Image (spheres, rainbow, N blue to C red):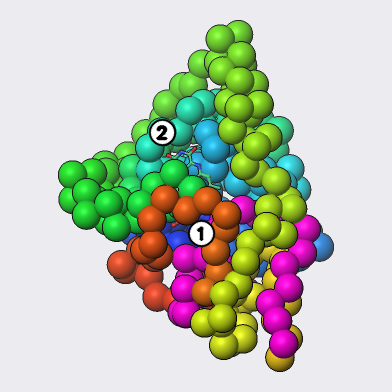
Amino acid sequence: MTICYFSATGNCLYVARRIGGTLLSIPQLMRQETIEIKDDAVGVVCPVYNAEMPMMVKAFMERVNIQTGYFFFIYTYGAGFGEGYAHAKLAAQGAGLTLCYVNAIQMVDNFIPYFDMQEQIDTLPKKNVEGQIETVCADIAARKTVDIKITAITKAQMAMYHKRLAERWLRKDTALSYTVNGDCVRCGICAKVCPANNIKVTEERVKFSDHCEVCYACLHNCPQHAIHMPLEAGTTQFRNEHVTLNDIIESNR
Ligand SMILES: Cc1cc2nc3c(=O)[nH]c(=O)nc-3n(C[C@H](O)[C@H](O)[C@H](O)COP(=O)(O)O)c2cc1C
């Protein structure tokens, strides 16, 4: 089994590890000229971003050549996944694949403009993450299949979420509004955790460019907590407790 994953704060990396098999980082795959994956089972594990999949995962699905008898998609999310299953089915179809199985695991919501990370961490036990992961692992081991219906209402909802959420929040120029405070020591970790290679660190400053994935890896993983966006609902950073800073660097650099 092969799992292709995208992870900014470790939830998806943790889930990918728990499902098992060969783990491939989508940011790293996207730097290859051609992406070909062949295995008996192939899955994507990625976060929900504004009721869709991350822009880079969408682009990955448009480029990848997957040969498998069992293709699945697992989201991690915090509050709600909108029409994420329909997005997964359409992305699979676009790649010439049948979406055999899709599921979503509710974890900490790292969307810092809306959510206080400390509150998210404190209420995490209620989400029974381990139970959700065990269900997904058992389903995949049994090669369970699901059929996602896409109706006219589904398509209308997708368009509505896209207009209200994605168009507002998933903007490639997002990081240009980020600020770096005086606690920054120019360690360069923000550049290393950025899956989009959107950050350059010189001796003088941290410079953001205009191809941000809006994953907040830089904000959440900065050891000095020096990177900020204009709207933050709390003062705590988040990284999945089973994942180290080095794991994120190794995944995204
Ligand atoms: C830009 C952005 C948008 C998000 N949108 C949603 C959303 O629409 N629904 C939701 O439940 N969680 C949303 N989240 C939260 C993530 O899906 C969730 O925290 C995920 O587990 C993070 O995975 P990671 O730790 O592997 O990066 C969003 C996070 C970001 C950064």
Q: Is mark 1 within 8 Å of ligand 1?
A: yes
Residue, disc 1: 7
Residue plotted at (70% across, 46% down): 171
Depth check: give the residue in front, 113 or 140.
Answer: 113
Could you say whether the residue bearing mark 2 is in a helix, strand or loop?
A: loop
Amino acid, disc 2: Gly
Image position of 107 with respect to 20: above or below: above
Amino acid, disc 1: Ser
Do callouts 2 and 1 mark residues in contact (Cβ within 8 Å)? Answer: no
Residue 23 picture location, percent across and down: 50, 64
Residue 219 is a magenta residue: yes
Residue 155 picture location, percent across and down: 61, 16
Residue plotted at (30% across, 51% down): 120
Which disc number belongs to residue 54? none
Residue, disc 2: 80
Image position of 73 with respect to 16: above or below: above
Would you say residue 101 is visible in this rendering?
no
- Which region shows up in magenta? 204-225
